[in-house]
Amino acid sequence: MEKIIQITAGRGPAECTWVVAQVLKKVLEEAQEQELDTILLQREVGEENGTIETATISVKGKNAGTFVSSWIGTIQWIGQSQFRKMHKRKNWFVGIFEIEPQKNTSILENDIQYQAMRSSGAGGQHVNKVSSAIRATHIPTGIAVVSMDSRSQHQNKKLATERLLKKLEDEKLNQLKNHVGKQWENQLNIERGNPVRVFTGSDFKKNKVEKNYKGTRQKLKNDLRNENN
């Protein structure tokens, strides 16, 4: 299972971008403890050193869904500003949102077209007589690469395939970044209430989040009323 989350400071000040950087560390550390695989897909650094405006992470593993659910929502940090020592504000908020992953389109062998061509450049008469270079084209996207590193056509085909797959992977990542960009409105929707996690102090220690037991109390009252009737 793969889940993608975005940690964002929204339109918050530099203090919030510092919090994003700390939350990113916590998420990666906790994911590692739970033996989940993580990939940092995108990161926008903040204006101050050690700060991050927004970060996007891919989380993969058996319990990825449960792990991500435990982080989704508002994160609160209670502490003195790292950048404005006289600032009176003590509560800072960032948000974590889930991003719908793009469809995983597998690359089929039949989707790649190979074309032999003559090498160019240094190499003497050999490169002019033998069509050892290979152009590999991914037919669905039109993305193409050329390999002329070796005199062996077989070796060039192998290199061309590796380069094409890398280029397609880079293109997929760029598409994901654009997809994330379209989710930027998430930054405007950070709620300041009911944080899922609370951290305090410059050491960013986790505080226990007090649960809202109003609903539970009401259910108990109803159960008692039903028993008395």
Image (spheres, helix red, strand yellow):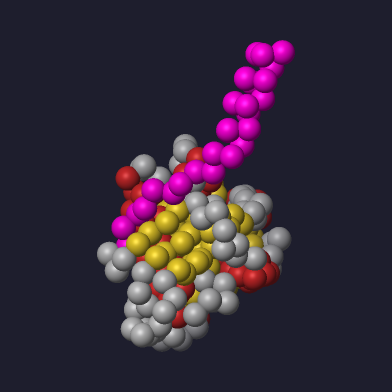
Camera sees residue 180: no
Q: Residue at x 35, y 62 (%)?
A: 200
**216 drawn magenta:** yes
On the rendered image, what quadrant is the C terminus found in? top right
Q: 166 above or below 37?
A: below
Q: Residue at x 46, y 62 (%)?
A: 76
Is 88 in front, or is 60? 88
Q: Is residue 69 left or right of residue 142?
A: left
Q: Percent position (x, y) of residue 184?
A: 64, 70
Q: Is residue 172 left or right of residue 92?
A: right
Is 49 in front, or is 172? 49
The residue segment tinted magenta is 204-229
Is 151 in front, or is 19? 19
Q: Give the mark count.
A: 0
Q: Percent position (x, y) of residue 26?
A: 36, 57
Q: Residue at x 64, y 70 (%)?
A: 188
Q: Percent position (x, y) of residue 97?
A: 58, 58
Q: Percent position (x, y) of residue 186?
A: 64, 66
**151 drawn magenta:** no
Camera sees residue 70: yes
Residue lying at the far left of the rendered structure: 203
Q: Residue at x 69, y 65 (%)?
A: 141
